[in-house]
Image (cartoon, rainbow, N blue to C red):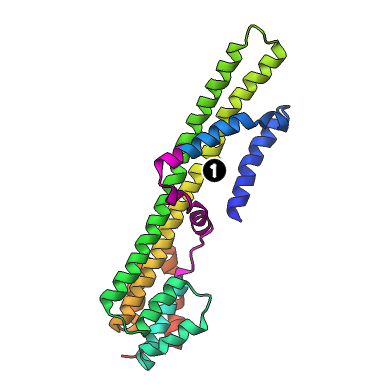
Amino acid sequence: MGVIIALVVSFGALIIGFLGEGGHVGALISWTPALIVFGGTIGSSMLAFPVSDLKKIGRIMKSGLLYEQGDLNQLVTYFYELSVKSKKDGLLSLESEVALNPDADPFLKKGIQSLVDGESHESISDSLGNEIDRIEERHKIGAAIFNSAGGTAPTMGIVGTVLGLVHVLEGLAEADMSSLGKSIASAFLATLYGLASANLIFLPMGNRLKINNQKELLEKELILEGVLLLEKKVSPKTIQEKLMGFLNGDEKDEKSGSNSTVAKEVVSPT
């Protein structure tokens, strides 16, 4: 939803500002500059990246742009409670956590299931670690594609404008002032399309993917560390202290405020 609102605000500001100066929307629409800018940008991307990566762009956008980080405080508390349960009833008791939470993070479910299945520390670390690497690679590719498009689109806009001006100058002797003005305006639309698409779509999306990648990796690394600590059967208090290292200052303050309540409700087994 935030992505849609951002696009509406950005393009809405441009259009309203243009209309406020006495322009009309029809003057901003022309298929030939759009073909040059976006066709050239797509072609450049196809040359720069394997087609197999470009085919994934829809899935990358969905998973990266719409990603929302879970509550890390709740995640730390969740692992604390899992540790208490496993200390009391054994790791096999955690199997119910997979069955009772069908909508839980698949990565988290996979980690817990690995514990229940009795996989070794190294096996769990390798399996979940490899999945984290794939997530990171996926987001890096997505960000690189959008950043590349953000660099290409303005250049293609200039190319489109130059081509348009060449056409105008070619027919300068035969053109009247009215048609000349429209032709020049159409030529500059290519620059507008290139600059607007780069700075309002491609580059912001690339940056958003990068930021969301960092957030998702932090969450997945917290889960991996929590699963490995459960496998080592360390105390619930130790798990809580180690996982709090993944929280920032504000999150730690919030967490510390709830620690006393948790401590009263759950007694850590020795």
Quarter containing the N terminus = bottom right
- Residue at left 28%, top 75%? 123
Residue type of the residue flagged with mark 1: Ile
Q: Which residues are magenta?
A: 44-72
Please tell me which residue lies in front, 106 or 234. Answer: 106
61 up-or-down from 243: above or below: above
* Camera sees residue 248: no
267 up-or-down from 208: above or below: below
Magenta-colored stretch includes residue 57: yes
Residue 86 rendering spot, x and y as whole percentages: 37, 88
Q: Main secondary structure of the magenta part?
A: helix
- Residue at left 60%, top 48%? 6
Which quadrant of the view contains residue 78? bottom left
- Find disc 1 in the rendering and name its residue: 201
Please tell me which residue lies in front, 103 or 51. Answer: 51
Please tell me which residue lies in front, 71 or 191. Answer: 191
Quarter containing the C terminus = bottom left
**Disc 1 packing (10 Å; few <14; some 14–19; many ≥20):** many
Q: Give the residue furthest to the top.
A: 173
Q: Give the residue furthest to the front.
A: 51
